[in-house]
Amino acid sequence: MNTEKRILFGIDASEFALQAVTAVGGLLANSKDYGITLFYGAPDPNLPFLSKALGLSAEAIEEFEKVCTLEEQKVLDRCKEALTDSGFNSDRVEMICEGKCSDPAYHLLQLATEQGFETLGLGLRGPARAERKLMGSVAYKLAHTAEDRTLWVIDPRISSRDVLVALVGVPISKRVVEHVVTYLSHLKDSRFTFFHVTPPLPPQYWDDARILDAKERQEREEQIDQWMKGYEDRVKAIAAEGKKKLINAGVPEENVTFKIQPQDRGIARDILEELEGNDYGILVIGRKGSKEIDQFGLGSKAHKMLHNGHALAICVVN
């Protein structure tokens, strides 16, 4: 399978992980050339401690290890069955188990590096925002350490397949668009909205604590207009290229739109309001922007999306 179209999806033995696998299987069910590798980092039962504490014989420990192995395989088999029941081709599912795994995030990232996975996936645990946990701390760790990987975080409650593509300018938005086209363009009936929140003016265009005369004010206004036009033109060009690629991939033209608005409550809150007000089920957002964009754009916004977005599949693109 093409490593660029494979997802390494981390699971555990919880019902939340099973539901997340079902959700991602449904999202990718109609794709033709994608593969999902399920990774289970089984907890370490600490057999030496148990043996000493309970006085277990070597034969009992051996039997216990066999039981653990069987249970680990059951976890993987259940998740594979959930994938196939959701419409995903069983021939494109692989399974890997790491026994005695004390740090699933580390092993997941190590496996991704060794086998060339560019995209990692995890389920979102917790029915409410205040109780939310991301597979323990696994997704939280990956969000902060897997800087060269794209991360999918799946809330099993996802009910829509419409896609909001958050754009921040350059160059991360180009990679965001490529990820959308590569992984989601098979969703022919979905709405794809390229969404951009125009940031505040950079400091060099602020009034510098003095009253400008008429000529200076006109020059300042012309500079601001030029900056705004140049900024918006770059974002529009990225959105136009993305629309063209989606249409070429078979998405109907009327299903692809571009929306731009000035910052209102803050970029993260504006994105959340757009998500919640228009029934999107998938958010694709850059992990962070360039130095130019960091002043105004996403930066920590992806982090805020992971903690405050709900009923979503959130794709954080490197």
Image (spheres, rainbow, N blue to C red):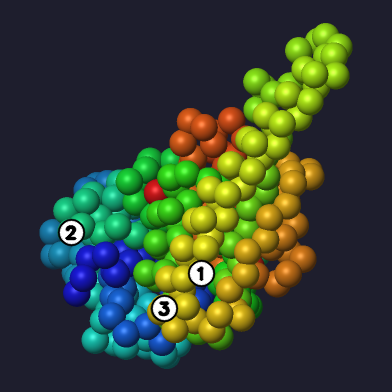
Residue drawn at x 54%, y 36% is 293
Task: Read off the residue under disc 1.
Answer: 243
| Three-letter amino acid code at the position of disc 2 | Gln
| Residue in the foreground of this view, choosing between 318 and 181 | 181
Give how far across and how far down residue 246 sits, in percent. Answer: 46, 74
Please tell me in which quadrant of the rendered image residue 204 appears.
top right
Q: Nearer the viewer, mark 2 or mark 1?
A: 1
**Which of disc 3 and disc 1 is earlier in sequence?**
1
**Which of disc 1 and disc 2 is earlier in sequence?**
2
Residue drawn at x 73%, y 24% is 219
Residue 107, above or below 162 = above
Give how far across and how far down residue 254 sits, in percent. Answer: 61, 81
Residue with the most extreme front position? 215
Task: Read off the residue under disc 3.
Answer: 248
- What element does badge 1 sit on? helix
Residue drawn at x 25%, y 55% is 112
Give how far across and how far down residue 52 sits, in percent. Answer: 24, 47
**Which of disc 2 and disc 3 is earlier in sequence?**
2
Task: Read off the residue under disc 2.
Answer: 115
